[in-house]
Image (cartoon, grey):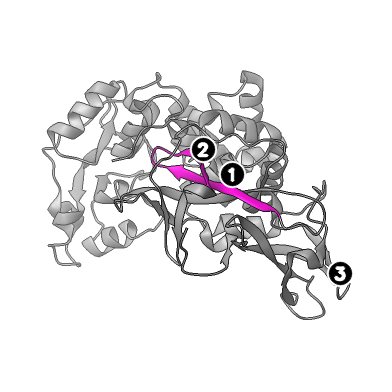
Amino acid sequence: MSTAPSRVYAARLVGLPIFDPQGDQVGKVRDLVVSLRSEGSQPRVLGMVVEVFGRRRIFVPMTRVTTIDSGSVYTTGLLNMRRFEQRSTETLVIGQMLDRQVTITSTGVTGTVYDVGMEQARNRDWVLSRVAVQEPAKALRRRGQTHVVEWNDVVGLAHRSPTQPATHLLQAINELRPADAAHMIHGLPAERRRQVVAGLDDERLAEVLEELPEDDQVEILAALDSERAADVLEEMSPEDAADLIAELPPETAATLLDLMEPEEAEDVKRLMSYAENTAGAMMTPEPVILGPDATVADALAHVRNPELTPALAALVYVCRPPLEAPTGKFLGVAHIQRLLREPPSSLVAGALDTDLETLRPEDTLDEVAAHLATYNLVAAPVVDEDGRLVGAVSVDDLLDHMLPENWRDRAVRRG
């Protein structure tokens, strides 16, 4: 095996692409698997947990890794695609070793592990050789002093601590995109997952929940106290919250809806009132809605909102007041491409597409898919029988409902 750096740190490996000998990417590194031995003995690195396309996690033995450099990992290409299952004798470096409290024997300093370095031994095995330790913050310092020491100069890593904090693991997760954070949380042991969920703020937890498989969503929400569960549901998009609440026992669902803010709960209840797999059930009630007196500059300011998905930012929906769904009379849509060609001071009403067919709340998945395909749209208005805008369906919403159940946890190759 060849490797550019003589020592590699685990936290820097996470997220690196992993390639086959032909240079095709097969996945991303998510963790290292090690076998802990007695206190002071360098653990052998057994392999890497790799997320392959389709979000399946597999085990790649270190004997299959040919090269590790600063930006990528290369393998022999002969990979077993069976899903990774952690054994009782194995430890995950990122998932279980970060934040472990240890003591540096040479100085008596106690701190927490924030990274671990590995290198090749003379017999070509990879072993953990360095430990990066951070002391608790003192006085006015925001962070404690850090130390990088030899593996055999620390005690506290050869056993699993029931009170292990999750500070550095949370930091790593908070730096990831929501989908990647969800994948990491999905792969954590149950106790570590509970610690991470407890440490995430409500908004971040909501983002992650939206990216997790259904079973994980229900399990995590059920473990929260009712007040926090309601707060997290309020931070989720109404359509995702409605889908999740529909999976809960009726009594639990009713309790959480009662605890939510009335306006947020009303949106969710309305979405839950529509038949499953219809435009009404999958739409978002919060697209960009403006009145006819809004200017192009107003519209462009709204679609710049970073919380909007690209699909929802592609159209502005113009209606008579009230401007919250269900609105007053729906007048038409303004395409972002058209708005970019108009003077900022002109009215959005002057750039409306009034000929675009609208969806009905009762339209089926197939009808929604055909509508978006027919008109080359990434989103479309949903209008009730009284001509009021009740929401918008985006291609993201459509795919979420057309893909197989728990598709996030299935090995379906992404295009």
* Residue type highlighted by circle 2: Leu
Spot occupied by residue 159 in the image (x, y as percentages of width and height): 81, 49
Q: Measure the alpha-carbon separation of dots 1 and 2.
A: 9 Å
Q: Measure the alpha-carbon separation of dots 2 and 3.
A: 41 Å
Specify few, some or many for label 1: CA neighbours under 10 Å numbering under 14, 14-19, or 20 or more.
Answer: many
Q: How many marks?
A: 3
Q: Which secondary structure class fits the magenta region best?
A: strand
Residue 173 part of the magenta segment: no
The reply to whether residue 74 is visible in this rendering is yes
Q: Are marks 1 and 2 in contact (CB under 8 Å)?
A: yes
Residue 48 part of the magenta segment: yes
The quadrant of the rendering that contains the C terminus is top left
Numbered label attached to residue 212? 2
Q: Residue placed at 70% from the left, 39% from the top?
A: 227
Q: Could you tell which of marks 2 and 3 lies nearer the N-terminus?
A: 3
Residue named by callout 3: 105
Left or right, 152 with respect to 244, comes to: right
Spot occupied by residue 239 in the image (x, y as percentages of width and height): 44, 34
Residue named by callout 1: 185
Q: Nearer the viewer, mark 3 or mark 1?
A: 3
Q: Could you tell which of marks 3 and 1 lies nearer the N-terminus?
A: 3
Name the residue nearer the viewer: 223 or 37.
37
Spot occupied by residue 62 in the image (x, y as percentages of width and height): 53, 50
Q: Secondary structure at mark 1?
A: helix
Name the residue nearer the viewer: 360 or 396.
396
The segment highlighted magenta reads: 43-61
Q: Secondary structure at mark 2?
A: loop
Pick out the residue farthest to the right. 108
